């Protein structure tokens, strides 16, 4: 599998800050087309940490779908994703997560200009109430992706 891009993702949730590196692989281009809207997809492997100390290191894999409206060299888009994450800590600053394995949902808006993509995103990370307590994280932030 050839790497198709990389990125950075930053997010905040109340007293927590998260920074992640993203490795990107395209699924297929395009998956579908409805009028001017194109559906594309990629896999996002994320590695990063949530602070304050002690840091919670996380690894995640999320298939992401992008609904794009190509307008010349730039394309506004909506992105959605559902994946899995592994967290090294099940408790951080009093927040109980109960399990190391967590689900991750992404919803975002952005724009792609040539090979650079930037956008705002919301990401929820929790175990889906499989084991309680399940406080989870709700990160609000932005991502920047660079495609080859």
Image (cartoon, grey):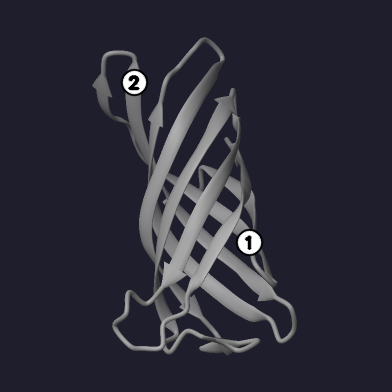
Q: Is residue 134 above or below residue 142?
A: below
**Residue nearest the viewer, comparing 43 with 94:** 94
Q: Are marks 2 and 1 in contact (CB under 8 Å)?
A: no
Does label 2 or label 1 sit earlier along the sequence?
1
Please indicate, yes or no, whether residue 2 appears anywhere in the rendered image.
Answer: no
Residue 46 image offset from top left, x and y in percent: 54, 62
**Residue nearest the viewer, comparing 111 with 28:** 111
> In the rendered image, which quarter is residue 17 located in?
bottom right
**Residue nearest the viewer, comparing 124 with 39:** 124
Q: CA distance from mark 2 to mark 1?
A: 29 Å
Residue 140 image offset from top left, x and y in percent: 59, 55
| Number of numbered discs | 2
Q: Residue furthest right?
A: 53
Question: SS class of the residue under badge 1?
Answer: strand
Question: SS class of the residue under badge 2?
Answer: strand
Residue 145 image offset from top left, x and y in percent: 60, 42
Residue at 65% over, 72% down: 49
Q: Is residue 21 above or below residue 92?
A: above
> In the rendered image, which quarter is residue 20 located in?
bottom right
Q: Work out which quarter of the rendered image holds the C terminus and state it.
A: top right
> In the rendered image, which quarter is residue 65 located in?
top left
Q: Kindly identify which residue carries mark 1.
A: 20
Left or right: where does residue 5 sit relative to residue 93?
Answer: left
Q: Residues within 10 Å of mark 2 (few under 14, many from 20)?
A: some
Residue 61 image offset from top left, x and y in percent: 43, 62
Residue at 59% over, 23% down: 114
Q: Kindly identify which residue carries mark 2.
A: 37
């Amino acid at each position: 599998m050839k790497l198709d891009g990389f990125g950075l993702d930053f997010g905040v949730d109340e007293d927590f800050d998260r920074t992640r590196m993203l490795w990107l692989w395209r699924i297929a281009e395009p998956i579908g087309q409805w009028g001017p809207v194109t559906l594309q997809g990629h896999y996002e492997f994320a590695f990063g940490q949530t602070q304050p100390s002690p840091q919670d290191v996380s690894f995640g894999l999320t298939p992401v779908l992008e609904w794009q409206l190509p307008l010349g060299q730039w394309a506004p888009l909506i992105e959605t994703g559902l994946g899995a994450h592994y967290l090294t800590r099940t408790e951080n600053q009093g927040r109980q997560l109960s399990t190391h394995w967590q689900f991750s949902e992404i919803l975002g808006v952005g724009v792609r200009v040539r090979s650079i993509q930037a956008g705002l995103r919301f990401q929820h990370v929790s175990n889906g109430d499989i084991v309680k307590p399940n406080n989870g994280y709700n990160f609000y932030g932005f991502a920047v992706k660079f495609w080859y």
